[in-house]
Image (tube, helix red, strand yellow):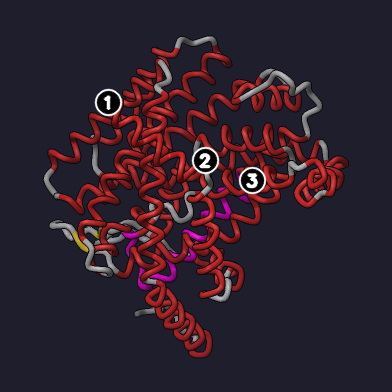
Amino acid sequence: MVRMGNIISFVNEILWERNILVWMLIGAGLFFSVKTKFVQLRLFKHMLSLVRENNEEKSQGITSFQAFCISTASRVGAGNLVGVVAAVSIGGAGSIFWMWVMAVIGSASAFAETVLAIIYRGKTKDGKYVGGPAFFLDKGLGKKWLGVLFVMSALICWAGVMQVVSNSVTESFKVAFGIDQLTVTMILIVLTGVVIFGKRDKISMLLSKLVPLMSALYLLVVLFIVIKNINLIPGLMTEIVSQALGIKQAVGGSLGAVIMIGIKRGLFSNEAGSGSAPSAAASADVDHPVKQGLLQALGVFVDTILICSATAFVMLLADIDKTNLTGMEFLQESFRYHVGDWGVIFIALILFLFSFSTVLGIMFYAKNNIMFLSERDIFQNMFKILVLVMLFQGGIQRNLFIWSLADFGIGLMTVINLIGIVLLSKEVKGCLENYEGNLLKKQKMGKTKITI
């Protein structure tokens, strides 16, 4: 165990402490932004139209909107709350600006990995679509061993994330309601167990309803707070930009830290480039890979530009003593300042919904990735049991080794995924050119369906 711990610590130090992973993600995002001529901006209006497209019941997979909701569910999670709190606490208002910048850059990577997941996906015995980085590493590069390594890294990461999510929920409920952690943990385990031991379709249907509801509810309360403080918004926006590019920070030597904190939180809250979201996107029954790629790029904007910004605005507009406030307490006290004591309860409930949706989204990811190794139900059930164990363990106490293991898993899977999408970048560019060519024809001929 000691030797394993040393190995994990060594890898985490290289990838995280020395910012190697951050620079790889930045490089990949810029690479695909240039290669696609900034498709995430050029076709943004078209992205929105795809969300409104008819999403009827699909015979061979989930709808594109359900796939969008599943990946958004895992993105819009505890990280949007706790992660942004950390960014603002350490990096100040300026870190939010760099989160926005990385949302734009990272969405290009999200687009690329999703397109490849659709191109190289396969089918299960019952005719359902299944795919993800493991599949395009195998079929596209002929490196099955690399696909297996990706799956193992992803499962390690997701199992560890379960503990982090559970711990965040139980601590927030203890603060808001005074309920002991064991009780909240058991409630979370029971709800999760009921859903994950059901059909995969149950997860997609639940998330397609839960994600829009919880996001709308959260944004509605934040909109009220923003309108209530509308006279402070111009000053807040000025503060965000000035701190992001400010001379004061540069002279003090803290500008680099502000930029790096914002970049880290932006990249790792929206998962762009990590290879997670394509595992859900590949299940969508769409008539062209680019359609789903654009929807996943939009998911990055929803996560960072909307949800993360909303969280930051609430904290930055709160006139409270932030000296001794950390973690969820900082956010809960900010909501208390704006809307009263019920704000503390509201955040606890929202965090529960965000976290529950994250758990279900990850379970969908895991199911697709385990199918790359085997379609036998025993392996699916073993992971489900492991998830419930991790939820229990994380709910009652923190385990720093498991948290480090989760960092190790996501770091390794991200490196593997980035290698794959860069090596297959010609496929992405060719697919995009095909789509835009057909889109132009469709506009001229009045047709609605695009095929590849």
Give the residue drawn at x 39%, y 41%.
11
Front of the two marks 1 and 3? 1
Where does the image place residue 22, in percent across and percent down from the top left? Answer: 53, 51
Q: Quadrant of the C terminus?
A: bottom left
Q: Magenta stretch: residue 306 in it? A: yes
* Mark 3 Cα shell of 10 Å, populated few (<14), some (14-19), many (≥20): many
Residue contact between numbered discs 1 and 2, judged by CB atoms under 8 Å? no
Foreground of the two, 196 or 430: 430
Tell me the quarter of the picture where residue 285 sits.
bottom left
Q: Is residue 334 visible?
A: yes
Q: Earlier in the sequence, mark 1 or mark 3?
A: 1
State which quarter of the image contains the N terminus: top left
- Label 1: which residue? 1
Q: Secondary structure at mark 3?
A: helix
State the residue at coordinates (50%, 38%).
77
Give x and y (percent) for residue 399. 39, 22
Amino acid under label 3? Gly
Q: Residues within 10 Å of mark 2 (few under 14, many from 20)?
A: few
In the image, residue 418 sits, relative to residue 75, either above or below, namely below
Q: Residues within 10 Å of mark 1 (few under 14, many from 20)?
A: few
Q: Is 293 left or right of 214, judged from the image as shown?
A: left
Instruction: State which mark lies toward you, 3 or 2.
Output: 2
Q: Tag 2's secondary structure? A: helix
Q: In the rendered structure, does residue 318 fall within the stretch colored magenta?
A: no
Q: What is the span of residues highlighted in magenta in the rendered image?
A: 282-307
What amino acid type is highlighted by mark number 2? Answer: Glu
Which residue carries the number 3 mark? Answer: 262
Q: Is residue 161 visible?
A: no
Label 3, label 2: how far apart the Cα atoms are: 15 Å
- Residues under labels 1 and 2: Cα distance? 22 Å
Residue carrying label 2: 17
- Label 1 amino acid? Met
